[in-house]
Amino acid sequence: MSPLAVPELDVTVRVGCSLAYEATGPAWLLLSLKPRPNRNHAIVFQALTLGDNLPAEEFTDSHGNQVFRVALTPGTHSFRHDAIVSVSSQPDNHDLPPSAPLTPGELPPAVLRYTLPSRYCDSDKLTNFAWEKFGQVEHGLPRVQAISQWVHENIEYRYFSGRPDLSAWDVLQRGYGVCRDFAHLAVALNRAFNLPARYVTGHLADIGVSEPVDHMDFHAYAEVYLGGHWFTTDARFHVPRIGRIKVSCGQDAVDSAFSTIYGGATLSYFQVWAYQVERGTVGVGDLLDFSKRLDNQQTVLTDAPR
């Protein structure tokens, strides 16, 4: 398998988040906020503030995510990540070759765990349903796309309906959810056919689309391993999107949470931003100014001279 070329990164996006936690006693956070290294984006500048110089340790977890372990003392603690990132103006998967799925005997050992049931992607409960709905669809990318289309058309998206205790099976039964639920169900259905699938979180600006609700948040979707490459599949939108900035991935949301709390602490403030800007006009740490936003429209503006 030859390595893929780096695409032209001709769009600039500002992404980040501001979080606050109230700690009532000793507590610790695992924070995954910095974008992962990826051929489809490049960090121009980024800044991360971890409270008031709180003790922190950075490490890479078993899925390749960058994680900070932060110790909290009683009181209020604020965290902020802000980044300027270059992305491609081309949509998802545009340069990936048509690929046949690999058998479990051909898969790299590190990928095998993404074929197995997990806490939120309980594919073992969905096997009969998956074969009834998609068993006649050609194995591989056609089946991946059919699963995405079915979830998109049959699961209702409801803002603020998410719950931390719902598995893919639960989402299928109730018939609605948020992007986390769409991703878990898509991942589980693909795993029912031994297709390695992983849960992904990151930022997604509205480049080339108009979003009437205009609600910026962390976004969850899926990737499926076909022929040696990870293909993006997003049942929430079911259309190729531009400018995904991947932060973390794993077997399900347990591995990909932006924060995991140990001890007496609660999230008290939460803001996320992801929007296109003109290159060179915005810096990390600047006040958020959505009048500088270039996306949320059908036209795709690039950094080339206009």
Image: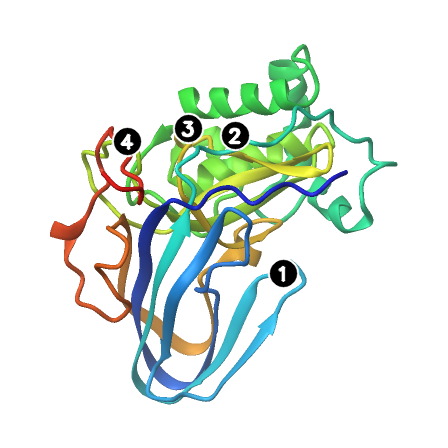
Q: Which residue is mark 3?
A: 175
Q: Secondary structure at mark 4?
A: loop
Q: Nearer the viewer, mark 4 or mark 3?
A: 4
Q: Which residue is mark 1?
A: 64
Q: Residue 270's image quarter? A: bottom left
Left or right: 37, with 208 as reference point: right
Q: Classify 65 as above or below 142.
A: below
Q: Which mark is residue 94?
A: 2
Q: CA distance from mark 4 to mark 2?
A: 17 Å
Residue nearest the observer in this picture, 294 or 123: 294
Left or right: 165, with 158 as reference point: right
Mark with earlier residue (4, 1): 1
Disc 2 + disc 1, Cβ < 8 Å: no
Q: Quadrant of the N terminus?
A: top right
Residue at 33% across, 57% down: 15
Q: CA distance from mark 4 to mark 3?
A: 26 Å
Q: Secondary structure at mark 2?
A: loop
Q: Nearer the viewer, mark 2 or mark 1?
A: 2
- What amino acid is labelled 1 in the image? Gly
Q: CA distance from mark 2 to mark 3?
A: 31 Å
Mark with earlier residue (4, 2): 2
Q: How many other residues sit within 10 Å of disc 4, few (<14), some (14-19) or many (≥20)? A: some
Q: Quadrant of the C terminus?
A: top left
Q: Secondary structure at mark 3?
A: loop
Q: Residue 99's image quarter? A: top right
